[in-house]
Image (spheres, rainbow, N blue to C red):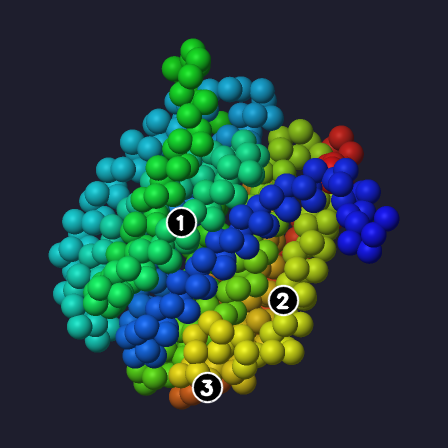
Amino acid sequence: MTMLAVPAWAKRSLLVRQNALLFIGGLASGSGSFIYHAIAGRLLGPVAYGQVAFLIAAYAVGATAALIISLVLARYAATLISRQDQTIRRVLIRAAFVVAAPGAGFVLIAALFAHPIATFEHLPSFTPVWLVAIAVALGWLLAVPRGILQGLQRFGSLAINVALDPVVRVAALWVLVGLGYAVSGAVAAVVIGLAAALVAGTYSLRDRFRGTESNHVPVLGGAGFPLTAAAGVVGIQLLFNQDVVLAEHYLSAHNGGIYGGLNKIGTIIFYLTLSVSQVLFPRIVDAVARQRYPARLLLSSVGILSALGVAALIVFAVAPGELVNILFGPRFSDATPYVFTVGVIGLALSLNNMLVQFLIANHDYWFIPLIAFGCVAEAGLIVISHATVGQVVADVLVAMVGLLVLLIARCYVLLVSLRHLPLRGNASVR
């Protein structure tokens, strides 16, 4: 046995194998995403990159609906599979049609308001705003195949899909910015990446278009689930995007770009560990459907996420300057003192996201006021204290860690209450 041999228990653990698949895909996706920002920062400089950071943050907020769609469909597919119901094809087709119409409407509405939005954020053109709207609509459609893949626990296909988008995005960015399209080219690259992933995601479910599935789509219980999922997804998205929007508004152009870079560095840990939450959610849904106690699944997932996050934090602590220089170049050197702190923010965000998804899967509603409080606290602290980059970083850290404490307390109370229910034993962590 070599020093690098994989432990036998890890080879046998389905949870570990599933996490490994999505981790590889997530690592490729995260790497591509940060390469995108690194190239944009180097080619455009702090001022223009600050505009790109705002637009990408705006896209992420607008694409919140995509995450909700994905979560709802993942839960739907996972529950159908737990019931051994195979009517996935009709779900896929119906969801695609339902999502397409509001997506087209959103693009038209955004076109009407593109000019005032561009003026508010000091953008030289309204074209990037319109392109962001197209990206949001494509993201909504892409959520359909991705959500179904997650619910079916086809993590290999999902990993490939999440990796494809940023790879295509980076290639398109290099070409478009090189041709002189600057901020508009950077946003157009996002559109191209999403379109490629949508085609690939639909193709990966091609086997579901074969056969003679029933045209009947069963209606699952829990009509309030989409609203619960929406609250969780919106809350998490606001937590790591509203600070960029507010920083770009309150700080100088240079410092706004610096904070935009810091935000992306901090979310390295979020995207590095996102696979753990993606694996946990359908597993918890399945456990709930089978009336299994979910504590072991949660604790095992928290352990995996924390190990990955701490490993990244060590790198942040040892080589902050090198990390900034590699990602954004010497013009972003002002970000160096805050690298470790934003890493801690990223780890807290990852844990918050995992606990929220765990609570959503358990049909819990009490997390909603908690995450709403966290979002309001973060925005309020930034509005009150925003004179420097360091003050904004401190505001976000306080809000993120405070929310984590509240969510841990809620999960503990939920698990204690579940102990008293007539469940069928612990959910397997295979």
User: At label 3, which amino acid type do we have?
Assistant: Asp
The foreground one among 257 and 76 is 257
Mark 3 residue crowding within 10 angstroms, few (<14) / some (14–19) / many (20+): some
Nearest the camera: 405 or 175? 175
Q: Residue at x 59, y 50 (%)?
A: 23
Image position of 328 (left or right of 179) = right
**Residue 10 vs residue 150, the one in the foreground:** 10
Establish if 15 lies above or below 306: above
Work out how far the residue at label 3 is from the one at label 1, CA to CA, in angstroms.
30 Å
> Which residue in the rendered view is the most extreme toward the bottom?
387
Residue visible at 55% across and 55% down in the picture: 27
- Rounded to the nearest angstrom, the CA distance separating label 2 from label 1 is 23 Å
Mark 1: amino acid: Asp
Q: Is residue 254 left or right of residue 104?
A: right
Label 1 neighbourhood size at 10 Å, few (<14), some (14-19), many (20+)?
many
Tag 1 secondary structure = helix
In the foreground, 375 or 18: 18
Residue at (17, 61) in percent of width and height = 127
Residue 273, x across and y down, in percent: 59, 56
Residue 212 in the image: state x and y as whole percent. Answer: 43, 11
- Label number found at residue 165: 1
Q: CB atoms at circles 2 and 1 under 8 Å apart?
A: no
Q: Give the mark nearest the N terminus, 3 or 1.
A: 1
Vertical side of 150 occupied by 165: above or below: below
Indicate the quadrant containing the C terminus: top left, top right, bottom left or bottom right. top right
Which label's residue is closer to the chain start, 3 or 2? 2
Nearest to N terminus: mark 2 or mark 1:
1
Residue at the image position 47 percent from the left and 72 percent from the top = 327
* Disc on res. 312: 2
Would you name the residue on which mark 3 appears?
334
- Mark 2 secondary-structure assignment: helix
